[in-house]
């Protein structure tokens, strides 16, 4: 179905209850609805926004077009949790109902200040010639959950030297000042991140660009995020327009980071290491992080990508968010682990141990469609070892370690309903270890894989048949010892 501009920019407030009821009914009948991931009730979800801890709860907003699986008029939808695992849908948080956000409340961030949660976002507008005019906007939520907007944008123009691709403010406090970074495109059509400074969150002064050594690195940097962790300054962003390079940058758009010395604000000098992708799988974009009360740096990403059709589109919805991940830094690289609270989901437990010798093994009752699985391969004397999940008739999703090429491989070429095939059905990344540990979170239509306690992560949507629930372990051209434990979710 081709969506017209008028259809994409309809407001939910203008839609009848019957139409919404019918759409929900279509969505609920979808066989690929997730069980433990944040997903939209209807329509399209994309970037996580405003991820924060306030008033005793984790708050998370996300981009939402409620009326179909397309990028249309964006709202902020609000969900919250006390434990990062059980999320409660609150409802619409920010509506595109003012002159400065008339064509969408785009991405942004949240920060607690003066006992309120301040929310910053890009207001998307279009003039009669359909030219984009972005504004940076502010709202705030009180302890009763009521959200109010500022009457005017806090930044009402794009600085000289940049195009109208100017969005996604991330705000944090450093000493007595507030700083905001915004993803931008220079007039020479290269991506960058710019910085503003404020003493009161209302009045902002433009400082310039963060001085990275990435002068010609894609045509736009979206969803920037800066934080300091373990005496490192970390800049996360999503560059668009990178050409594939070996195993890297194989998706339509990428998300990654650079690590360096903390930026000595208000100076914008930043000495950093090379750019690394955050996730080596298929479906990961626009992540956002926060620091929780215990000092953990937590991150959630959009488990999807722009400009790609997904099999759930025909069921009236699209996309979900990843599980929360805890970040640390080791040797200038980010380590990502599933938050410990995911253990709250664990139900029935099963364990298997054994030797696999040039064989494919399955174990009685060791199967399922939604579960957490940890499998370790020791004493590897084989050319490859791995696990196949969601196995059924002519279907399987393979995660393996190729010992010969020293790569981790995620193969979804037989994972069920095909999609995005123009970007390939295999992802792989360099890896070398004597013991290989795969920590999988498998939902109805996704898998997230943490390799060797988060040294690598690979995320992908998969759309198998409901009856494809087998789990198989294998070793090729040799043998390996296997230890595996699985929890139903």
Image: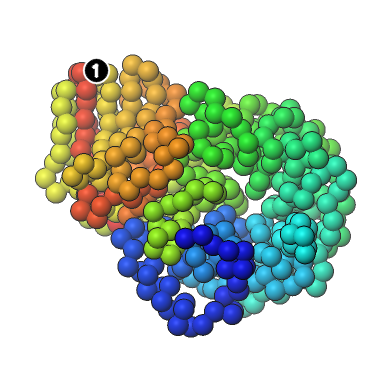
Residue 85 point in image, percent of width and height: 43, 59
Left or right position of 423 against 394? right
Q: Residue at x 52, y 68 (%)?
A: 66
Q: Quadrant of the C terminus?
A: bottom left
Mark count = 1
Query: Looking at this rendering, what residue extends furthest in the bottom direction?
Result: 17
Residue 308, placed above or below residue 78: above
Q: Residue at x 32, y 54 (%)?
A: 444
Left or right position of 207 against 58? right
Q: Depth check: give the residue in front, 140 or 409.
A: 409
Q: Depth check: give the residue in front, 174 or 50.
A: 50
Q: Depth check: give the residue in front, 209 or 133.
A: 133
Q: Residue at x 15, y 34 (%)?
A: 361
Left or right position of 253 against 232? left
Q: Quadrant of residue 353?
A: top left
Q: Depth check: give the residue in front, 386 or 102.
A: 102
Q: Is residue 61 visible?
A: no
- Dot 1: element: strand
Left or right position of 365 against 413? left
Residue 135, placed above or below residue 160: below
Q: Which residue is mark 1?
A: 381
Residue 260 point in image, percent of width and height: 68, 31
Crowd tier of the residue under label 1, counting other residues whose Cα lies within 10 Å: few below 14, some 14–19, many 20 or above: some
Q: Quadrant of residue 101?
A: bottom right
Q: Quadrant of residue 330?
A: top right
Residue 188 point in image, percent of width and height: 79, 36
Q: Residue at x 46, y 36 (%)?
A: 423
């Amino acid at each position: 179905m081709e969506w017209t501009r008028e259809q994409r920019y309809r407001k939910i407030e203008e839609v009848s209850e019957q139409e919404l009821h019918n759409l929900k009914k279509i969505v609920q009948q979808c066989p690929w609805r997730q069980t433990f991931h944040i997903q939209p009730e209807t329509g399209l979800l994309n970037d996580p926004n405003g991820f924060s801890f306030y008033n005793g709860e984790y708050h998370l907003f996300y981009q939402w077009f409620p009326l179909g699986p397309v990028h249309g008029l964006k709202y902020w939808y609000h969900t919250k949790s006390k434990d990062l695992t059980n999320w409660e849908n609150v409802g619409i948080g920010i509506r595109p109902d003012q002159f400065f956000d008339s064509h969408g409340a785009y991405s942004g961030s949240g920060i607690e200040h003066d006992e309120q949660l301040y929310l910053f976002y890009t207001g998307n507008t279009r003039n009669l010639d359909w030219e984009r005019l972005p504004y940076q906007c502010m709202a705030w939520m009180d302890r009763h959950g009521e959200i109010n907007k500022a009457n005017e944008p806090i930044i009402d123009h794009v600085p000289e030297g940049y195009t109208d691709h100017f969005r996604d403010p991330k705000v944090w406090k450093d000493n007595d000042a507030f700083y905001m970074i915004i993803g931008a495109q220079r007039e020479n059509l290269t991506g960058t991140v710019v910085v503003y400074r404020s003493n009161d969150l209302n009045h902002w002064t433009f400082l310039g660009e963060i001085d990275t050594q990435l002068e010609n690195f894609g045509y736009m940097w979206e969803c920037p995020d800066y934080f300091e962790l373990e005496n490192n300054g970390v800049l996360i962003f999503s560059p668009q327009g990178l050409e594939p390079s070996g195993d890297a940058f194989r998706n339509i758009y990428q998300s990654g980071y650079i690590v360096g010395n903390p930026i000595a604000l208000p100076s914008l000098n930043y000495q950093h290491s090379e750019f690394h992708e955050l996730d080596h799988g298929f479906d990961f974009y626009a992540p956002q992080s926060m620091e929780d009360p215990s000092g953990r740096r937590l991150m959630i990403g959009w488990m999807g990508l722009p400009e790609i059709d997904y099999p759930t589109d025909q069921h009236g919805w699209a996309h979900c968010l990843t599980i929360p991940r805890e970040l640390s830094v080791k040797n200038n690289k980010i380590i990502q682990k599933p938050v410990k609270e995911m253990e709250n989901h664990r139900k029935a437990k099963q364990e298997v141990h054994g030797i696999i010798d040039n064989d494919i093994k399955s174990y009685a009752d060791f199967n399922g469609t939604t579960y957490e699985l940890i499998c370790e391969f020791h004493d590897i004397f084989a050319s490859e070892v791995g696990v196949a999940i969601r196995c059924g008739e002519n279907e399987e999703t393979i995660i393996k370690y190729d010992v010969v090429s020293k790569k981790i491989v995620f193969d979804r070429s037989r994972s069920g309903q095909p999609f995005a095939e123009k970007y390939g059905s295999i992802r792989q990344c360099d890896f070398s270890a004597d013991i290989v540990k795969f920590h999988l979170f498998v939902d109805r239509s996704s898998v997230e894989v943490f390799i060797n306690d988060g040294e690598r992560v690979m995320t992908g949507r998969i759309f198998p048949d409901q009856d494809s629930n087998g789990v198989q372990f294998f070793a090729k051209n040799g043998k390996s010892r296997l230890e595996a434990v699985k929890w139903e979710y």
